[in-house]
Image (spheres, rainbow, N blue to C red):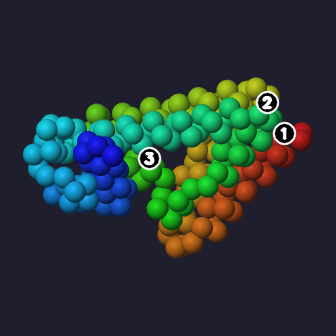
Amino acid sequence: MSTRDRLVESTRELLRERGYTGTSPKAIQQRADAGQGSMYHHFAGKQDLALAAITRNAEELTATAERELSSPGSPAERIAGWLRREREILRGCPMGVLAQDPEIIASDALRSPIAEHFDWIRGQLREILAEGGLDARLADTFLAVLQGGYVLARAAGNTEPFTDAVEGAIALLERATAV
């Protein structure tokens, strides 16, 4: 892995663990095993590096969601597959955690890739729901269940609330498609 990639990956991990304020350039450099000169050779500063990390999060999560949501099956099966995919639940959503960070949300540059990612998923879910003859507003419901499930699981210290929230949403989806 190149020094630039190590810096971005280290920043991704630290932002998820500590938030923007708690992620210092020194901590990034230590985790990436890179010197200050290397960091500033590749990035103008902490915000530039954070933007690269957030953008990479968005790209990876979008690619994963695209594979899951475009897989074979009915609209309900594709959405259920996306909701049930394996996640690091107790670490929180890589994008949702960032959306709760006041420093990130205060910056249009840092908030933008997060908003774009969620807007893209909303759009995909809306299309799939419409394809199945279902209310497209359910897209927001599924995103809220997913993000809320992360919060409940983290607060409880176990994955059961997340799993229950997801399975409850899938049960509602299945009932809606059976009507």
Instruction: Name the residue carrying label 1.
Output: 177
- In three-dimensional space, the C-alpha distance between marks 3 and 2, rounded to whole angstroms, equals 28 Å
- The x, y position of residue 58, in whole percent, is 44, 38
Name the residue furthest front: 1
Q: Are marks 1 and 3 in contact (CB under 8 Å)?
A: no
Would residue 130 appear left or right of 124 to someone viewing this image?
right
The secondary structure type at the circle numbered 1 is helix
Name the residue furthest bottom: 157
Instruction: Name the residue carrying label 2.
Output: 132
Q: Nearer the viewer, residue 40 or 93?
A: 40
Query: What amino acid is at disc 3?
Result: Met
Q: Nearer the viewer, residue 15 or 106?
A: 15
- The x, y position of residue 31, in whole percent, is 26, 59
Query: What amino acid is at disc 1?
Result: Thr
Would residue 123 appear left or right of 135 to someone viewing this image?
left
Q: Are marks 3 and 2 in contact (CB under 8 Å)?
A: no
Query: What amino acid is at disc 2?
Result: Gly
Task: Identify the disc placed on residue 95.
Answer: 3
Name the residue furthest right: 179
Q: Are marks 2 and 1 in contact (CB under 8 Å)?
A: yes
